[in-house]
Image (cartoon, grey):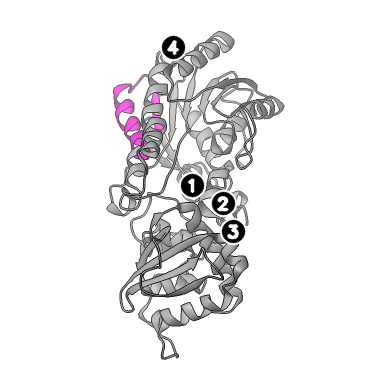
Amino acid sequence: MLQNTGKLAGCTLFITGASRGIGKAIALKAARDGANIVIAAKTVEAHPKLPGTIYTAAQEVEAAGGKALACVVDIRDEKQIGEAVQKAVDKFGGIDILVNNASAISLTGTLETPMKKVDLMLGINLRGTYLTSKLVIPHLLKSRSPHILNLSPPLNLNPTWFKNHTAYTMAKYGMSMCVLGMSEEFKGQIAVNALWPKTAIQTAAMDMLGGEGVAKQCRTADIVADAAYIILSQPKDYTGHFWVDEDVLKEHGVLDFDQYAVQPGHPLLPDFFLDGTPEKLVQQMEQHGATPAFTPASSSSATSSSSGGPIENTFDVIRGILNEEVVKSTQAIYQFDLSGEHGGVWFLDLKSGSGSAGQGQPPVKADVVMAMDSRDFTEMFAGKLKPTMAFMSGKLAIKGDMTLAIKLDKLMSRMNKAKL
């Protein structure tokens, strides 16, 4: 890992969403310099699926050598942010660095995203980032080395990154637009930059989004923390950059990236917003010495020795593994809208009896509708194309309940054991 230099010793960092994940990793990295860390987050009691609270994070910060102030903050609440900022100033004498890390995500289409979730994402990602920055900036202007760092992506306007989750992209890009505007507005006074991971990062949120087995395709949050440390150690005229973690580290002599991998040597899952097509994702992964987790489909992938065709053959295998146990553990109805050479509508009923599958519309409204090319469908159920990669690269569009969509991953694993 990148060695600490002591440059953040005595600095006060106000970090939103610092009770776990990337926010906590950045806090711990700065704490090793002896920095003061304000943990501004909502979690005060342990969550069954999301480990860590503001108090456990504060204990870890102090164990690492820093000083901690745990503040209960919902960044949609101006009063709570204002109170936390004042507590930080009273305790540590000022604020030198703001890290806007808190974020909400829902990877759903326009018709499938309730306005409550739209408001949540815009309220936290866009408004929360803007509001927290607005309230902290007066104190940053008094610092000798002031920084704002937003955990948000470069502004890639390829429609691929909008079409499956317009609301999330708008909200996340709102954080990046804060960087674009504020870096120019406060040029020469405050360094304002963005940082985004090159690959998926293992966090509790990623585990929930990616389902079983996604961790081995990820890097740890330490790579983002090390990149953030480099950026926050720069002078205040180092501003207006949209950095990717790996690029920052390469510029500062880091060449060994296996040290950040959850499972060194395993193919890595590229993060959102960086590339526009599956082909580019493959090229990018190969350029950096990885074996892509998928390859663009070729015409031969749809061929089959059986007269029933590749889709029918796939559903024959699916029918062979259906039973009451699978139905009981899944409780969902799936519809597959397939295009291309073997296009058509198929269904998978894992909600009643021992389950059923076949061509045509499902007997009742589907909980999840998946749209993709028929060749990609065959490869996905054969284990040659990972569902998470298919979704992130735009090959797979999902409408409906994402939690139930993830459950289908387990069925695919069973099919692979059945040697599709």
Q: CA distance from mark 4 to mark 1?
A: 32 Å
Residue at the extreme right of the image, as rendered? 63
The residue wearing badge 3 is: 213
Residue 409 x/y as whole percent: 53, 63
Would you place residue 215 above or below residue 124 in this image? below
- The residue wearing badge 1 is 246
What element does badge 2 sit on? loop
User: Mark 2 — residue?
Assistant: 257
Q: Label 3 is placed on what type of residue?
A: Gly
Please report the bounds of the magenta region as a residue range.
172-193
Gap in angstroms between the C-alphas marked 4 and 3: 47 Å
Label 4, secondary structure: give it: loop
- Label 3 CA crowd tier, 10 Å (few <14, some 14–19, many 20+): few
What is the three-letter code of the residue carrying label 4?
Lys
Whether residue 208 is situated above or below residue 398 in the rendered picture:
above
Asked if residue 192 is among those painted magenta in the image, a careful observer would answer yes
Confirm whether the magenta stretch covers residue 124. no
Please state which of the two labelled residues, at mark 4 or mark 3, is closer to the viewer. 3
- From this viewpoint, is residue 144 visible? no
CB-based contact (under 8 Å), mark 2 and mark 1: yes
User: First in sequence: mark 2 or mark 3?
Assistant: 3
Q: Answer with mark 3 or mark 1, whichever residue precedes in sequence.
A: 3
Label 4 belongs to which residue?
Answer: 142
Mark 4 closeness class: few <14, some 14–19, many ≥20 residues within 10 Å? some
Q: Is residue 326 left or right of residue 406?
A: right
What distance separates the C-alpha of mark 2 from that of mark 1? 8 Å
Mark 3 or mark 4, which is nearer the start of the sequence?
Answer: 4
**Dot 1: few (<14), some (14–19), or many (≥20) neighbours within 10 Å?**
some
